[in-house]
Image (cartoon, rainbow, N blue to C red):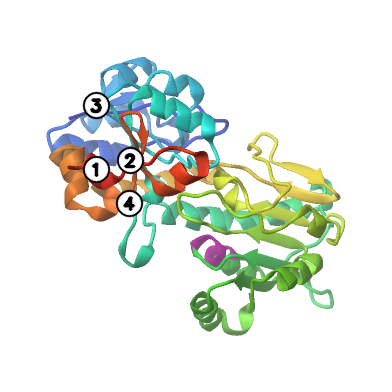
Amino acid sequence: MRIGSPREIKNREYRVGLTPESAKELASHGHEVWIESGAGEGIGAHDAQYEAAGAKIVAGPDPIFADCEMVVKVKEPQAEERAKLREGQLLYTYLHLAPDPEQTADLVKSGVTAIAYETVTGPNRTLPLLKPMSQVAGRMSIQAGATALEKAHGGRGVLLGGVPGVMPGKVVVIGGGVVGFNAAQMAAGLGADVVIMDRDPEVLERVGTHFEARASTRFSNKANLEDAVSEADLVIGAVLVPGAAAPKLVTRAMLKTMKPGAVLVDVAIDQGGCFETSHATTHDDPTYVEDGVVHYCVANMPGAVSRTSTYALNNVTLPHALRIADMGWKEALRSDPHLAQGLNVHAGRVTYPAVAEELGYELLTVDEVLV
């Protein structure tokens, strides 16, 4: 199979779909790998390293979109990239379609077969291709939130860990999954006063056992959420409904009860955000103030730590890429029901239930595709 990885063009996105090591692995299986010149510069991987790994360097993205059977990316294709996709081509990347009707319409129109990293499943309802970026984003959310809390960045002027004789900052983490767990780890490590909120008693028990006295847990209902948010210096939105738009848990009314200069970090912004007042921002202009509260809503947070993120991502995406290339995508999906959950669009139809329901498409089931 001919596999291509173009340079990412989203704002401040420095990650790349394939590392030189991944390119070498694919080439060793007899596949042809094309890399756009400069695609790996953001992780310190130069064209010569890809060539040494057996990849072909091409000028610009056009040859990849025109001639490669599978396109491997990191972020959802931007409008100019979607215009280059074609029927029968395979796209393997993060998509986050539910809150993005324009992207979904373009993918449907293109006829492409699109497999989304974020809906590929694992044992026990896990999301193994999303997990490493959730770990990165969770940890980064505390760094970003701590910076935004500084007075020079519009915040309250609070040091999360405090100092002897001064109370630490209060961090509320909404969601005890991978993002929330990693955010809580970082916040607790800094010495902050951490509260983790979730609706699942088993999650609360698990994180409570792990953190013991270093963080407290609280059931996430409306009353408790209103109370916790009003007391917080930093709120981390870490809620995920796989493949669907995030629920709006923190309302505009709640913002009016928060301390001036408090900070919200919405890690769910890729799925539309879990704060009513959230809208996507970029690394160039990461924050804005709404009702006196600083919002950090960067939609590709892990792109800022591109080398760590790319290698962590390739660790989990490469095995599936190899299976798809070696077996063909249909046989790969037939043989692995977890990978089959990643199919979101095929031949002009939406194939993921949550996306079809959210955006009003008639669902073509994966079973029907694989007949």
CB atoms of marks 4 and 1 within 8 Å: no
Q: Residue 242: horizontal and vertical position, in percent?
A: 46, 54
- Residue 360 against residue 50 in the figure, above or below: below
Question: Helix, strand, or loop for circle 4?
Answer: helix
Q: Is residue 139 visible?
A: yes
Image-based side of 59 in relation to 192, left or right: left
Q: Amino acid at mark 1?
A: Glu
Q: Amino acid at mark 4?
A: Val
Whichever of callouts 4 and 3 sits on the residue coming sooner in the sequence is 3
Determine if the magenta segment contains residue 127. no
Look at the image and give the residue range highlighted in magenta.
Answer: 178-183
CB atoms of marks 2 and 1 within 8 Å: yes
Q: Which mark is residue 343?
A: none
| Quadrant the C terminus occupies | top left
Query: How far apart are labels 1 and 3 at the CA level?
Result: 22 Å
Q: Amino acid at mark 2?
A: Leu
Question: Helix, strand, or loop for circle 3?
Answer: loop
Q: Residue 106: horizontal and vertical position, in percent?
A: 45, 25
Please name the residue that numbered disc 4 is placed on.
316
Question: Helix, strand, or loop for circle 2?
Answer: loop
Query: How far apart are labels 2 and 3 at the CA level?
Result: 23 Å
Q: Residue 343: horizontal and vertical position, in percent?
A: 32, 43
User: At 28% from the left edge and 50% from the top edge, which residue is drawn?
Assistant: 339
Please name the residue that numbered disc 3 is placed on.
69
Please name the residue that numbered disc 1 is placed on.
368
Whichever of callouts 4 and 1 sits on the residue coming sooner in the sequence is 4
User: At 26% from the left edge and 36% from the top edge, which residue is drawn?
Assistant: 23
Question: Residue placed farthest to the front in the image?
Answer: 362
